[in-house]
């Protein structure tokens, strides 16, 4: 089964500067740290990550 | 890296719990919430934060002011009834509508929800707003969850 991601925001005509690069980087850093926590086994962590991704329609 | 101390950006009890259980998460969360309030109109974000708190019944969050942004008290009082209130601007209403959908069922946010934001904001601003919503929602859910789980454990012990 193939998922086709709907485009929610219009595509930029050219190169564009991110409006909030610090926020995007902060979210990435937060997620990296959470994924590296070792109190929960990696398989459970990955299952939770995949469930969250599906709920948020995140296909990256 | 040790925590650099409380900044008020994170709920105090959540900061204390995370500092004890997962200090590395506490540190990056503090940085993230510092960026949050620079990413989009802080008054609108504050309204959305308060709306999330009322939807989730988060009494701690309702009385915090992490952004330091002043919102008119009459707007704070009317936040639950914003659809019927004349106090809120059209951009604020578009953001509050998406906030409710995001918190209630994020998987059901529709293209028309996003298009309503694009009337007032650039695509980059919409992306920043939705990212900020994620951070605000996540903070409150984490705080509520940890309070519930840990308080029942402490009661049991």
Image (cartoon, grey):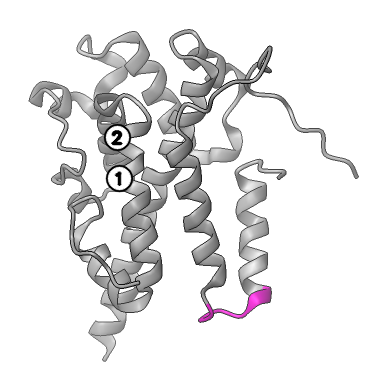
User: Please, what is the dominant secondary structure of the magenta stretch?
Assistant: loop
Residue at the image position 24 percent from the left and 25 percent from the top: B43
Up-down: is B11 above or below A39? above
The image quarter in which residue B3 lies: bottom left
Contact flag, marks 1 and 2 (Cβ < 8 Å): no
**Mark 1 residue element:** helix
Tell me what residue is drawn at x 27 percent, y 14 percent: B84
Question: In terms of depth relative to the viewer, which is nearer, B151 or B34?
Answer: B34
Against A36, residue B56 (above or below) is: above
Pointer 1 residue: B34
A41 in the magenta segment: yes
Residue B80 on the magenta segment: no
| Residue B123 x, y percent position in the rendering | 54, 19
Q: Quadrant of the C terminus of chain B?
A: bottom left
Residue B26 appears left or right of B63: right
The percent coordinates of residue B24 (x first, y second) are 39, 70
Instruction: Give the crowd class for mark 2: few <14, some 14-19, many >=20 residues within 10 Å.
Output: many
Extent of the magenta region: A38-43
Q: Position of residue B95 (x, y in %)?
A: 39, 22
The chain identifier of the residue carrying mark 1 reads B
Give the residue at the far bottom of this rendering.
B157
| Residue ranking furthest to the right | A1
Q: Earlier in the sequence, mark 1 or mark 2?
A: 1
Near mark 1 (Cα within 10 A), the count class, few <14, some 14-19 or many ≥20, is: many
Toward the viewer: A11 or B120?
Answer: A11
Residue B38 locus on image (x, y percent): 32, 33
Which one is in front in this view, the residue at disc 1 or the one at disc 2? 1
Label annotation for residue B51: 2
Q: Residue at x 60, y 39 (%)?
A: B107
Report the side of B35 relative to B6 (left or right): right
Residue B140, visible in the rendered structure: no
């Amino acid at each position: 089964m193939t998922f086709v991601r709907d485009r929610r925001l219009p595509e930029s005509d050219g190169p564009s500067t991110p409006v909030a690069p610090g926020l995007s980087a902060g979210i990435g850093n937060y997620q990296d740290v959470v994924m590296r926590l070792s109190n929960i086994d990696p398989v459970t962590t990955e299952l939770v990550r995949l469930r969250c991704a599906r709920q948020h329609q995140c296909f990256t | 890296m040790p925590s650099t101390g409380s900044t008020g950006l994170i709920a105090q009890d959540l900061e204390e719990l995370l500092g004890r259980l997962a200090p590395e998460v506490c540190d990056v969360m503090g940085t993230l919430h510092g960026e949050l309030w620079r990413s989009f109109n802080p008054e609108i974000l504050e309204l959305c934060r308060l709306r999330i708190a009322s939807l989730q019944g988060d009494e701690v969050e309702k009385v915090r002011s992490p952004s330091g942004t002043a919102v008119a008290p009459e707007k704070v009082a009317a936040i639950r009834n914003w659809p019927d209130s004349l106090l809120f601007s059209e951009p604020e209403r578009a953001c509050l509508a998406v906030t409710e959908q995001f918190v209630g069922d994020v998987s059901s946010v529709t293209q028309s929800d996003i298009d309503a934001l694009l009337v007032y904001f650039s695509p980059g601003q919409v992306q920043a707003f939705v990212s900020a919503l994620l951070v605000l929602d996540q903070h409150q859910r984490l705080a509520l969850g940890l309070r519930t789980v840990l308080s029942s454990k402490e009661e049991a012990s």
